[in-house]
Image (cartoon, rainbow, N blue to C red):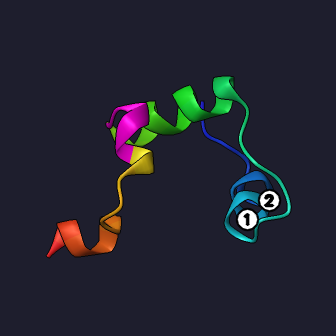
Amino acid sequence: MALPQQTVYSWASGRTQPSYENMDRLCDILDCAVGDLFEAEPVQQKLF
């Protein structure tokens, strides 16, 4: 089940923060652990 685009936009813009349930869903989508979302190194740098 995908996350609504507006929900993700609200997180990215800082208006809201994801619930624990949505963090788990996000990690499923991104195939990562919750701890990976809090690393100091930006994800974009890891991809290159």
> Which residue occupies 61% across, 39% down?
2
Residue occupying the point 58% across, 34% down: 23
Q: Indicate the quadrant containing the C terminus: top left, top right, bottom left or bottom right.
A: bottom left
Residue sitting at x 85%, y 63%: 15
Mark 1 element type: helix
**Side of 39 relative to 16 (left or right):** left
Q: In screen coordinates, is 38 left or right of 20?
A: left
Q: Position of residue 41 (x, y in %)?
A: 30, 65
- The percent coordinates of residue 35 (x first, y second) are 38, 36
Is 3 left or right of 48, judged from the image as shown? right
* Label 1 neighbour load within 10 Å: few <14, some 14-19, many 20+: few
Q: Residue at x 66, y 23 (%)?
A: 21
Q: Amino acid at mark 2?
A: Gln
Q: Is residue 1 magenta?
A: no
Quick check: marks 1 and 2 in contact, CB under 8 Å? yes
Q: Choose top left, top right, bottom left or bottom right for residue 8.
A: bottom right
Front residue of this view, candidates 27 and 42: 42
Q: Which of the labelled discs sits on residue 6, or is there none?
A: 2
Q: Which residues are magenta?
A: 32-36
The spot of residue 6 in percent (x, y) is 80, 59
* Amino acid type indicated by mark 1: Tyr
